[in-house]
Image: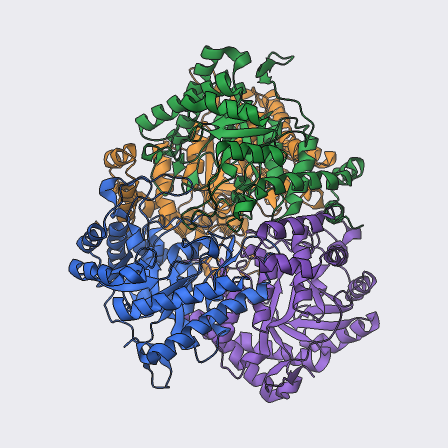
Chain colours: A blue, B purple, C green, D orange
Amino acid sequence: MAFKQNAAGEWTPATPQYALGEAFAAGIWNMGPGGSRFAPAMRPALSLEQTLSEMKAIGCTHVEFHDTEAEPADAETIMSAVRNSGLEVSMCTANLFKRGPEFANGNFGSPVAATRAESIRRTKDYIRTGIEIFDAKVYVYWNSSNGYGGPMQVNYKDLFQMTADGLNQVVAWMLEEYGSERALPIAIEPKPNEPVGWGVPADCGETLAIISLMDPKYRPFVGTNLETCHALMAGKRYAAEIGLAAAAGKVFYVHLNGGTGLKFDEDLAFGDNDFGVAVETLYTLQEIDYRNIVGIDVQPLNTDTPEQQSASIARSIRNFRRAQEVCKRIDSVELNALRSTADRAAVSEYFASVCAGVK
Amino acid sequence: MAFKQNAAGEWTPATPQYALGEAFAAGIWNMGPGGSRFAPAMRPALSLEQTLSEMKAIGCTHVEFHDTEAEPADAETIMSAVRNSGLEVSMCTANLFKRGPEFANGNFGSPVAATRAESIRRTKDYIRTGIEIFDAKVYVYWNSSNGYGGPMQVNYKDLFQMTADGLNQVVAWMLEEYGSERALPIAIEPKPNEPVGWGVPADCGETLAIISLMDPKYRPFVGTNLETCHALMAGKRYAAEIGLAAAAGKVFYVHLNGGTGLKFDEDLAFGDNDFGVAVETLYTLQEIDYRNIVGIDVQPLNTDTPEQQSASIARSIRNFRRAQEVCKRIDSVELNALRSTADRAAVSEYFASVCAGVK
Amino acid sequence: MAFKQNAAGEWTPATPQYALGEAFAAGIWNMGPGGSRFAPAMRPALSLEQTLSEMKAIGCTHVEFHDTEAEPADAETIMSAVRNSGLEVSMCTANLFKRGPEFANGNFGSPVAATRAESIRRTKDYIRTGIEIFDAKVYVYWNSSNGYGGPMQVNYKDLFQMTADGLNQVVAWMLEEYGSERALPIAIEPKPNEPVGWGVPADCGETLAIISLMDPKYRPFVGTNLETCHALMAGKRYAAEIGLAAAAGKVFYVHLNGGTGLKFDEDLAFGDNDFGVAVETLYTLQEIDYRNIVGIDVQPLNTDTPEQQSASIARSIRNFRRAQEVCKRIDSVELNALRSTADRAAVSEYFASVCAGVK
Amino acid sequence: MAFKQNAAGEWTPATPQYALGEAFAAGIWNMGPGGSRFAPAMRPALSLEQTLSEMKAIGCTHVEFHDTEAEPADAETIMSAVRNSGLEVSMCTANLFKRGPEFANGNFGSPVAATRAESIRRTKDYIRTGIEIFDAKVYVYWNSSNGYGGPMQVNYKDLFQMTADGLNQVVAWMLEEYGSERALPIAIEPKPNEPVGWGVPADCGETLAIISLMDPKYRPFVGTNLETCHALMAGKRYAAEIGLAAAAGKVFYVHLNGGTGLKFDEDLAFGDNDFGVAVETLYTLQEIDYRNIVGIDVQPLNTDTPEQQSASIARSIRNFRRAQEVCKRIDSVELNALRSTADRAAVSEYFASVCAGVK
C-alpha cells in the first residue's frame, strides 16, 4: 500500500518507517567508469551483480534504477539479481535525458507535442514497472532537459503549465490503473541548470508552485525529491528546502550528496566540502521526523581508482553517521530557547561549537 | 472595486486596465540623497512636492509609498499633495525593515511572537490607509528581514508556515473589515538576500509555495510583485518568473528595474546592463496581457548629481519605450513557429537580430 | 617569426595582422555529435574533411586542434587535409583532460610528480607539432583538471607555484629548441570550474598572477586566451578581462562564445543570451586594437539537428558582424566625453540606445 | 622598521612576529549601531574609550582605523586613548568611499582626474599619519568604489593601469619621504562588488595582476589584505586566495570574517556559516607560517542587542581558537601523504572526520 487516507480523508504516502541510518539507497549509476565532456572513462565498468554486491557490502539496503539501466523488458531479470543481492528497490525513474535527441527540447513542458507525449508514455511505462515488478517505494521525475537555455526560447507561462499538465495526465492514468492505494508516490527532483541553462522546476519553491498548478485531486500524489547539490547550485540552503517541502507535506524522498555552490553538478559525497551542511541536514530530517529510506546520489571523484568505485557512497554513509554523532551534541531545548529569542549570535556560536566538538 | 468574481465564482483582482506604456509608477524613495554602508549621502534631500512634481514631469502617472515615508497619521495631508501633483497612488507598503530593531529577526515568519504580531498589526494599519485614504491599487508585502542568515538559526518548516499564517490573518481581517470587493490585492515581493543572508520567500517559486500553504479561501487575495533585480540576484530569468506567476494567475503588479546578477541589490534602471532583459520582459508582459500600472523601483546611481535625482526613473521609462520599439520588430507568428519546433538556434539568432536591429 | 623584439628589447608576439572580421577560427571539436553526462549523442559524427569543408563554407579561415583529435603522429596527414580545405591552423593545444585517468589530479600544478612530468612532456610534444607541422600562431594551455575540488585537497601555495614552474620548464625548453623568434606564443586559457570544483587559474587575474610567479625571462612568451563563457562562469565581465590582459600586454588570442553566468560550461554562440556582451566585446577589441585571428569556441545546442552541425559557429560569426554594425553607431568621442565625467547614467542610456538602435 | 632587505637584496616587510592566536586586531567600526539601506540603527553608539576598552576586554591586542573615524588632525588625541586602553594600532586606511560624492566614480582608477588626484592625496596623508602618529604595521587600500557598474562605463585597460599608476605614485612619495626602512607596507584589499557592480581589483588574482602592472621598483612595497567574506563573494576559496598571495610573497595582512557566498557583504563572524572554512584558513595560515597580527573585520548581526556590541568580534576570536583546536587533530604527515597521491576521497573524509571530531 503506497498511499493511505489521513483523518481528514486526504491521501498521503504510506511511507516506509525506518529510523534515520537504518536504510540507505544508492543509484546503480553511482558506481562505474565516470566520464564526461571534460573527463575520460576513469575506471572499468562493473556488472550489475558486482555493483549490487558492493552496495550491500558498504551498507546500502536499497538500490535505485533509471529505465535506461533497467529497461522494462529486462526488469524481471534485474529484479532477480536485486533479490539475490539482499537489496530492495527504493526508487525508479524514467531517464528522459540520455534516451535520445527527441528529449533535447524538454519533456512534460516541451513546446513540441510529440516530446510531451513520449515523455508521458515513458513515465507511465516505468511507473508500471515500479509498481508491478520492482515494488518501488517512490517514482522520481527529474526535470533534466525541461526548461530553456536562453531568452525567448519558450513561452514561459506555457512551460510551467504544461509541466503541471503532464503530471496531471500521469497521475490520472496511475489512479485509474492502480487506484489510490497502490499508486506510487511521484517525487519531483528539481535542478536549476545542466543540461539546460535554466531547468524547470529549479528548486523546491518552483516544484511546489508547479504542484499548485495541478488539478487539486491529483496533487496529493506528487511531492518532492530534493537533492543537496541541486539546492546548492540554486543558491539555496538544502535544509531550508527540506523545511519548505515539509511545511507542504511533500518530503516524499531525499537525495543526499554534496556540492560547492553555483557551478556544475558535482555530485560530491554527502558531507563533502561543508560538513555543517550534513549536520544541519541531519538535524532537520530529525526535526521533520523523516522516516523513509535515505537516498544517496553521488559520483566517484575523477581521482577515484578502480578500487574506489564505491568510495563516494561509502563516505556518504559514514559522514551521515558522523553527522548523527554531532547531532547528539545538540540540546534541542537549549537550541530552541536561543532560536525563540532570535539570539542569532548565540545560535551561530552554538552551531560552530557543536560542529567542531570544542566548547 | 478591487476584486471581482470570475465566471467560476473565484475572486480575482479588478486590475486597472492600461495599455503598456500608459501608466508608470515610481517609489517616493526612488529619488533623494542615496547613501548606504559604503556610500555617503550624495545629493540633497527633496521635499515631497518637489519629488512628486519631478515624477510627473518625467512621465509617471502614479506614486508608491512606504508607511515610514507616509505614516498613516500623515496620509491625508500627503494625499492632498499627490492630488495636487496630478499623480495617483498605485501601491503602498508597510516598511517592516527600517522601522526599528524589533524587526531584525523577521516579520510574519519571525520566531519571536511579538515581532509576528507587530508585523501583522502594522500591515493591517497600512492596508487600511491604502484602502481608505490612498485608494491604492495594490498593497505590497516585501519580505525584507524575513528569513535567516546562517545554519540552524530557525526552524525552517515553521518559518515558511508562519509566513503563510501571517498572510492568512491579514487577509481574514481585511475581508471581515472591507469585504471581498473592496479588498486590496496583496502582492508579495520576494528577494533572495539582503538584509538577511537568505530572505523568505526568495523568488516567485517560494512565493507561490507560501501562497499554497495558506488557507484556500484566502489565497485568491494574495499574489506577486516580482522585481527584476531581485530575480537576477536569485539566478532567475525575470521573464520566466513572470511566466510562472502568470500560470498561477498571480501577476498582481510588477517592479521593473535592473541588476547584474548574484550580488547586492543594485536597483539599476530598467534596461541597464542587459537590454535584452528589458526586451524579453516587454514581450512577456504583452504575451500575458499585463494591463496594470507598471511600477519602476530604482535608485539613482552613486554618480548621479543633484541634477540627476530622477535620472534612473526617467531612463527606465525611456528604455521601456525603446523595448516596445524593439518588440515591434518581432513577428510573433514567426517566433512561435520557431519555438514550436524547438529550433533554439534560430530563436537565439532571431532574438539577437531583433535586439540589434540588424538582419 | 612568432616573436620579435620591441624598441625596449622585449620579446613580444609577432601577431598576425588582420582587420576584425577578416579571420575567424573554430575548433575542430565545435561540430559533431555532442553528448555529455546529461545528454546522449545527438548528431552523427563527421569526417575531418566534412568538418573542414563546412567550416570554410560558413566563413572560417582557420581551424584549431587538440592533440587528441590530431595526434602528433597523424599531424602531417591532417595538415594536408587542412591545406586542401583552404584553411590554416591558428591554434593547437595538448588535451590534458580527456587523455586518461593520469590527469584526474591536475597537470602542471598536480601534487603528483608523474602527472606534472607527463603534462610537460605532452605540452612540449604538441608545441613541437604546432611549430614544425601546423605552423600554428598560438599554443593554448587550458587549465582543465588543474585545481582542486574541495577543502584541504592540495597545498594551495604549491599548486600556484608549481603551475608557474611547469610553464617555466616548457618555455625554457622551447627557447632552447627553437630560439625566441620561432617560439610559439603560449596563451593560458583560464576557467573557474568544471571538470574540477575550482580550476586554476580561474580567470584573467589569476592567469596574470601565475605569469608573475614565473621566471622574468620566460614571462614574455606566455599570455592569455580568454574565453567569454569561462569569464561569465567566474562572475567577471568578459570585456573587462580583456582590458586587464591588454594592460599587461597579454592578449595573445581570444575565444569568443556565450554563456548565462555562474553555472556549467554552456559554450553558447557568441552573442547568445546577452547581445550587449557581444557589442561590448567588439568595442573593446577595437579599443585595444586586436589584430589576431578571432577564435570561436562553441558547441552545437542539444536541439541542433544533423543539419545544424555548424549552426553555433555560423551564428557566432553572424553575431560578430552584427555587433560590428552596432559598434558603428557608437561615436567614440561622445562616449569618451561621457566616460571622462563619469556620467554613468548617460553612458548606460547611450549603450541601451545604441544596442537597440532606438534613439 | 617596516621593511628590511632579504639575502637577495629585495625589500620585504619586517612583519611583527606573533604566534597565531597571540595578536588580534579589530576595526573601530566593528562595534556600534549598525544600519544600512535595509536596516535602521540597531544599537546606541559607543564612545571611542568604550569601544577600545571593550575590545581589550574580549581579547584584542590591536585596533584599526579609517581616517573618517580618526582624522589626521585628531590622530594624536586618539592615539592617547589607544595607549590608555592598552591596545596598539595595527592598521590604518583612508576611507575613500564614505568621504563624499567626489569618490562615487572610483579612486586610483577613476576616469576623473580630480578623483584620482584626491585619492592619492588622502592616501599619502593617512600613510603619514600611520607612520608618524599611529606606528601602524600596515596601511590598507580597499578598492571601494574603484571599478564600474555596467557595460561601457569605463575604458577597462585604463582602469587597471591607472589603478597601478596611483599605487606607483603613492609608493614613490612614501619612499622619498620616509625611505625604504620606514615605509609602511601597503596591503590592497580586493572586493568583487558593492558599492559598485564590479569592484577592481576583485580578488587576489586581480590584485597581484595590478601589482605586476606597477613599476618593478615599487612592487615590493605593495601586497594584499585578503578578507574571507570578499573572497566568498567572488566565488573563491579563501584559503586558496591566501595560498596564491603566499606564492607571490604578498600576504602582508589578513582580514578574517565570514559570509555565505555570492551575495551582499555580510561581514559575519569568522567561523560563521561554514566552520570548515575557519579550519582550512587556520591550517593554511600555519602552512605559510603567518606571523603577523590577525585582523578581524566583522559587523554585529542585526539581531545583536546593545549588550552584544562586540559579539561578532568575540565570537570570531573564540572560533579562531576552536579552529586551532581542530587543527591539532590534523596529522600533517598523514594529510600530506594522502595529498601527494591525490587520494582526494581520503582527504575529503579525513577533513570531515577531523572537523567533526568523529573518527
Relative placement, left or right, of A276 versus D171 is left
Tell me where residue D178 appears, x and y as whole percent. 58, 23
> Looking at the image, which is closer to me, B41 or B159?
B159
Residue shown at 48% from the left, 35% from the top? C47
Tell me where residue D89 appears, x and y as whole percent. 50, 38
Q: In the rendered image, which quarter is residue A18 located in?
A: bottom left
Q: In the rendered image, which quarter is residue A335 located in?
A: bottom left
> Looking at the image, which is closer to me, D172 or C147?
C147
Residue D4 makes an appearance in the image: no
Rendered view: B172 above or below C254? below
Rendered view: B234 above or below D254? below
Relative placement, left or right, of C331 versus D7 is right
Tell me where residue A248 appears, x and y as whole percent. 42, 73
Rendered view: A56 above or below A15? above
Relative placement, left or right, of A37 versus D329 is right
Residue shown at 52% from the left, 80% from the top? B168
Residue shown at 45% from the left, 51% from the top? D54
Tell me where residue C181 appears, x and y as whole percent. 55, 12
Residue D41 makes an appearance in the image: yes
> Looking at the image, which is closer to me, B254 or D100?
B254
